[in-house]
Image (cartoon, helix red, strand yellow):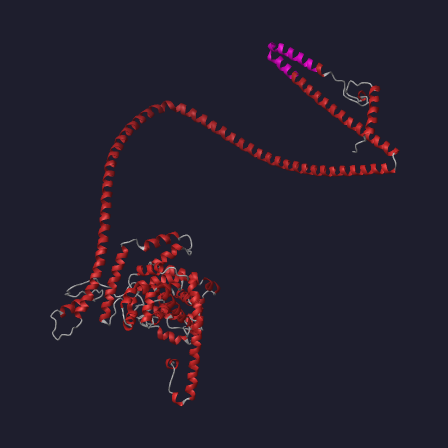
Amino acid sequence: MLDPTSKDLEESMAQEEKRKLAAEPSKGVTSSTFPFDFGRIPHKARRPLKEIIGTSKNRNSMESSMEWNGNKFATEMQLKFQSQQEELEGLKKELSSQKELVRLLQQTVRSSQYDKYFAGRFCDGGPKDKLELLHQKDNQILGLNNQLEKLTLEKDSLQQEVKNLKNKVGELNEQLSMLMETIQAKDEVIMKLSRELSECEDQASSQGGSAQLSLSSSMNRELQELDRLKDSLQGYKTQNKFLNKEILELSALRRNAENRERDLMAKYTSLEAKLCQTESKYLILLQEMKTPVCSEEQNPHDDVVAQLLEDALRVDTNEHPEQTYFKPHMVSEYDIYGFQTVPEDDEEEKLVAKVRALDLKSLSLTEHQEMSTGVKWENYLAGTVNREMIRSLELKNLIRSGIPHTHRSQIWKWCVGLHVKKFKDSADPGYFQGLLQNALKKQNPASKQIELDLLRTLPNNKHYSSPTSEGIQKLRNVLLAFSWRNPDIGYCQGLNRLVAIALLYLEQEDAFWCLVTIVEVFMPRDYYTKTLLGSQVDQRVFKDLMSEKLPRLHAHFEHYRVDYSLITFNWFLVVFVDSVVSDVLFKIWDSFLYEGPKVIFRFALALFKYKEEEILKLQDSMSIFKYLRYFTRTVLDARKLISIAFGDLNPFPLRQIRNRRACHLEKVRLELMELEAMREDFLRERETNPDKRDLISDDEEDG
């Protein structure tokens, strides 16, 4: 609604003052300023409020004075009082409704006056004023429409809320009814139990007289039994105290006995280790005494020395000679890996092997005095029962210290699976068997060479020593399947030894994937091809590392022009197989299968550092080269070698090895290309020159 101007409001106020003076005051509404007669509105005659209140008070006073006449009269008066209060409340509600009616009428009169005012202006004003008023009314209508829409939306939301509340009320009523039913059921149960309890009490009261006598007698018996049990308990406590004292004393004695036994076992182990060392020296002494000297006279003690040497070199057997001068520690014919400990042919080699076996036993006995690595492995594997093994620093340190014989098969299989997971996932089920069937059906060029090398693989191992040995057929299957998978390589001498070592702990298929790991994952390309390109590159990388890590030894070799790559080439090609003793070999393979080819460089350097001082004492090339041919078989302390490889030679970054491989690869390729060109020139010259036709190359001679 539009507000009137100040001049219009003054005129309207003046008119209203005149109307107030002319109008009669109305008793029904004291505050009304409008000239309407509210007395014309029909309504029932009501008594004044003060009179009603006064009457109610008089009645209350009368009722209070009559309370002493009886409860019945007081009750009637109380009911009348309540009815009067209800009537009073009704009057108050009617008064409030009359006030609301007056307020609405006032608003109606005010709006009619405004409409009249604006209508007068609309009739008296010009076209512009009319147009302006119409615009104001339109704006007012739009505002009211917007307000109406808002109110409509609010009404809808309130209706939705009311609906939701009704639904909640319905749910609550259902829950209430369920609870009421539950309460009713519980009340019935309570009533039933109350009745049963009352019946039981009645029966107990009727039987109480007769049961009282029997109860008193039974209580007397129970009291006597209780006294007897107390006496027994006291006796048992005294006996238990004495037995506990005895147990404590026996436990102390047992602990002392265990400590003494532990000390004696340690002492026994130490003495046995010293005895093995003494026996090895004794064997060396016997050999020196048996060596002939430049004398024609026969030593009378030669027969005794020969008999002592024969007794010392005897291996474990069930046959006992009737008379022996001395019986040292017997050495079994084969070790736990199946390798022959003492050779059968050469007596001097037998003596060296026996000395080596005794030294190894002495080292193993010394190691057992400390905490065994087997205990650490048992604790680690116990923690991986419910989870898969993952690469970790703890696992790497455990593997570097050596995997126990009982767990090596499991750990090797896990390591191989870790490296060839992508190959195995992409291969079809039964992939190995399929390759083997294809290789058996159709012979390939590698089959003949494989058959020739089977018995030459590990002749000193009982699993591969004869055509009927159990490992020969497994070795054949794995090599044939691999030659079918890699026709470019086919077969290379050295692969047979890698597979033979893997088969000592793995099944055929796992050994096949182990060979795939070494050839296709660890080693560079062309490592086992006809040119052995990768192997030649690694020898040059190793020479660089020798000059950095062991500069004195490298300079010593350079001074005497010793090409030690003739010795180390086979180390890298077959990962030290037939180069070191079996205990050291398998510890190297443990780390190799987990960490990769960098381990070969570490242990090759460690072997030279292990014997560095002995090599530096040699002062001519012939003695140096002769020593290099067998010195690795004299390295027996695996713990010391591992400490050198993974401790003294650090840092050892793999990135450096890769960079040097790339650098030397190009040089070796250029050299091979030059050699190939020289070979072709030689062949052409031989064809053209009749004098050189009888000359043949090395490759033709091998063919």
Horizontal and vertical percent position of residue 378: 34, 53
Can residue 504 be seen in this snapshot?
no
Q: Residue at x 26, y 57 (%)?
A: 366
Residue 667 lies within the magenta run: no
Up/down of 61 relative to 212, above or below? above
Q: Which quadrant of the figure has residue 440?
A: bottom left
Horizontal and vertical percent position of residue 365: 26, 57
Up/down of 33 relative to 635, above or below? above
Horizontal and vertical percent position of residue 300: 11, 70
Q: Which quadrant of the figure has residue 334?
A: bottom left
Q: Is residue 673 left or right of residue 23?
A: left
Of residues 542 and 189, the one nearer the viewer is 542
Q: Residue at x 57, y 35 (%)?
A: 175
Up/down of 121 relative to 458, above or below? above
Residue 56 lies within the magenta run: yes
Q: Which quadrant of the figure has residue 460?
A: bottom left
Query: Where are the magenta residues, as a range?
Result: 52-80
* Chief secondary structure of the magenta portion: helix
Q: Residue at x 78, y 26 (%)?
A: 106
| Screen quadrant of the N terminus | top right
Can residue 661 be seen in this snapshot?
yes
